[in-house]
Image (cartoon, rainbow, N blue to C red):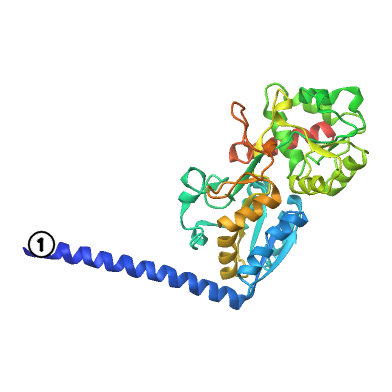
Amino acid sequence: MDLIGRFAVVGVMAGLLTSAVGRAQTFQTWEQTVAAAKREGVVTVIGPQGTETRDALTLGFQKKYPGIRIELLSMAGNQIGPKVLNELAASRNTTDLAITGATTALETLLPGKALTPLKPILGGPNTRDPTRWRGGKMTFSDEAQSYNLVFSSYVKAPFIYNSSQVSPSDFKSWKDLLESKWVGKIALKDPLSAGGGLGNSTLWYTHGGLGKEFMRQLLTQKDLVMPRDDRQMLDFAARGKYPIAIGPSDVLTNEFIARGLPLKHLLPETLKEGTYITSGNGTLVVIRNAPHANALRVYVDYLLSAEGQLEWSKAAGFASLRRDVPKDHVPDNLVAKEGMTYPDISTEKYVDLREEIVAFIKSVLGR
């Protein structure tokens, strides 16, 4: 063998050795991360409202990592931005990560420079292989493909109704809500804040068959109420005070339905204009200057594992984007149907329109 050939062999052997050492270091590094997380002893998480999702985001992790306590604060999307941004401005951030909607992430937290890139954090045993996810990669809602990771999505029901007072056969179009029989019977989640009210407004604003005129008529309908509180909306609907609820938290809706209350989702295919797909609360962001750098890595790895995603999916009622997580427990109306077109309002294309949409809504409401 000539000298060049010997150097080539040595180079290959060195490469193999380096690769093996790299694998060992990766394993040891993760073990060291877990050990450091246990020394930190806590991870602080902001999550969506709802008892079932609270359990899904805490119990399994606590069982697997009893040495790391979870401090979980359940909040509506419009409450998260002010909390996080105010704490960062005061250099007193207490939050490691937030499980929230893409609107909160893209409209408030990312422009406020409150987030840190996620990809460097995705090095644990359950997050280092992107082929486990739909399409062979992890999905991000932001243009940089780095800050807002989407781990579940679903078809948004047009609205929730009290089945003892409202018949789905009364509706074939969104425009049917404008009929006089529904005056004083509709609650719309505040469309000026992140959530289902703004989500539906995005659909209406961008749909050629609805648009500004439909929105103007609905928003100025006599006795239309626009609460910010999801539980209040669902309580109104369950008691029949406002039997049609547009845009309440889907997690809370599923919880109310599971309690046997007379609430139902209007099936998306009922309306000729359809509905949209959204990530809902199924996205993840990591907050800048997180106080527990190692514990948050361990938590993110668990949340995005097959085990963590199954618990989330069962509690939230939405399908995980992870390919090895079953979907047989997900209500059929939340799964995309063949032959139907759904705009995905979690993408930046639609989120970028929100400011314009909010300005139009304010002009209609005189605010």
- In the picture as drawn, the residue positioned furthest to the bottom comes out as 39
Q: Position of residue 99 (x, y in %)?
A: 66, 55
**Depth order, front residue of 93/276:** 276
Q: Is residue 211 above or below residue 46?
A: above
Q: Is residue 125 above or below residue 360?
A: below
**Depth order, front residue of 45/322:** 322
Q: Residue at x 60, y 40 (%)?
A: 347
Residue 307 in view in this figure: yes
Kind of element beneath mark 1: helix
Give the quarter of the image for residue 364: top right
Q: Position of residue 239 (x, y in %)?
A: 92, 42
Q: Residue at x 78, y 49 (%)?
A: 255
Residue 115 in view in this figure: no
Q: Residue at x 92, y 32 (%)?
A: 184
**Residue that label 1 marks:** 4
Q: Is residue 200 above or below residue 290?
A: above
Q: Is residue 362 above or below residue 70?
A: above
Amino acid carrying label 1: it is Ile
Q: Position of residue 71 (x, y in %)?
A: 71, 67
**Depth order, front residue of 30/163:** 163
